[in-house]
Structures are given as C-alpha cells and as structure tokens.
Image: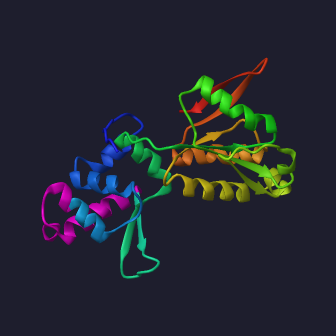
Amino acid sequence: MVIIVVVTSEVVEVEDIIGGVEARRIILKKLLDGPKSGVELRHALATAFNRSVTEISDAMLYFNLQALESAGLIRRSRGRNNWKAKFAEIVPEKIQLVRKYFGITVPIVCMGGLDDPEHMRGMRRVFKSDTNLTPVKYIFIISNNFKRKIAGIPEDTVFEEVEENVLEEDFEEVYRKIRSIVEKEITTHEVVLDLTCGSRVCVLSLFKIAWEFGLRCFYVQNLGENERRIIWIKD
C-alpha cells in the first residue's frame, strides 16, 4: 500500500486535527486497517519511531487518541470478547476522508436504487465508456416484488430488498437500511452512490448519506440511442 499525503481543501480538516503531530498520523494510518487495541497501537508507534514498546508511554498514547476522538475522527469502545481492552476505530463517516488524506485507493462498490432492469445492465457500459472506475460489486436497493422482473443476475450484483410501501414512504427506515450497508462496505471499499433510479425516498436517503460520509455520487443521463453519460453531483 503506497501512502502519499495530499493536502487539499477536502482533507485540510484532517491536517488541522493532526496538527503536525506524527503520532496521530501513525495512529490514523494504522486504524485504516480496522479497529485496533491500545497494545496494537503502541506497537505501531514503537515501530514507526524505532523505539521499544516500553518507551511509548501511556500518556503519549492516551493524549493523541483523546485528541483524535475529541475531533470526531475516531471512537473508542470496550472489546466484545474482552471488556477490559479498549479498541479505537475511525468513525465510518470519516473513513473515506482519511483515505483521501493519505492518498489511499481501495476497490469500489457502486450502490443505488433500482426500478428499471435495463439500468442494471447499462451500468457496466457507462462505467467503461465514461469513467476510469471499475466497481468490484454493485448493490441495488429494490422493492420486495421487483426481483422477479430481473433475469440474468451477474455474480457481482447484490440486491437488498425492502417492502414496497416502506421503500416508497418511510424515509427513516430506508435511510437506516442503506446506512447500515454503507457502514459495512466502507471499511474495505470506497462506496460510490448512484442516484439515477429508485423511489424518491431511496434517492433522498442516498443523497443524505453521500454528504454525511463524504462519498462520491452521480446520476446517469440518457442521451438517447443507447448513449449515456455520468453526471457527477459530488466528486
């Protein structure tokens, strides 16, 4: 994994929080691999600074974790199997922001609503012709009676079914459903959101999540004669 620090207007928030403190940068980089215990972070700091583990004080570790947590970049909680151990992790809404700061790219998952089977088939064509993105997986939010209208489902496509009346009317429930999927996927993938299809409730939920998690989102413009192009709403 190649790390290139690029400070732009999008990631200046992270740079301000780090404040030039190398220990915080090391901790954040380590947490991009997933939740870590205090012991694991202590070892990461010792390795980075070429010191022994005993030279990394409790105060040093606590102070820098506290600064990152107070700024809203990380959260800490007790372990499920070991209540005595405390684990730190990047909050899901900030994972993509931290990746941008370090210049890290990960495989892409494309997620959106679906109420037109042709859109599912056309997504691959428009990605190949209009972007340099190649999603490894497509996730579509569909009503529970829509799947039977779809034939020939590709292996890289996943459907998340929601009761039709909920999908049309219950913003909070649809938002919670989509958010839970994004929180799971974003730990290992960049999630790109497609706002082209789906119910109004679904599209609004996706749009809200795009802003909360700092995710790219787009819609596909139909130009006629089977020609389409991607319009980025948030890139």
Quadrant in which the N terminus is drawn: top left
Closer to the camera in the image, 22 or 53 = 53
Closer to the camera in the image, 110 or 158 = 158
At x 28% / y 51%, what residue is drawn? 25
As drawn, is 217 to the left or to the right of 201? left
Closer to the camera in the image, 104 or 174 = 104
As drawn, is 127 to the left or to the right of 68? right
Prevalent SS, magenta region: helix
Its colouring scheme is: rainbow
At x 74% / y 35%, what residue is drawn? 121
Closer to the camera in the image, 18 or 121 = 121
Q: Residue 67's x, y, as percent? A: 31, 59
Q: Residue 89's x, y, as percent? A: 41, 62
As drawn, is 71 to the left or to the right of 127? left
Can residue 54 be found in the magenta stretch? yes
Can residue 71 be found in the magenta stretch? yes
At x 41% / y 45%, what residue is drawn? 99
Q: Residue 165's x, y, as percent? A: 85, 56
All told, the count of numbered labels is 0
Q: Residue 87's x, y, as percent? A: 38, 70
Q: Quadrant of residue 82?
A: bottom left
**Vertically, is 64 above or below 131?**
below
As drawn, is 83 to the left or to the right of 59? right
Residue stretch rendered in magenta on the structure: 46-73
At x 68% / y 47%, what residue is drawn? 155
**Vertically, is 83 above or below 87?**
below
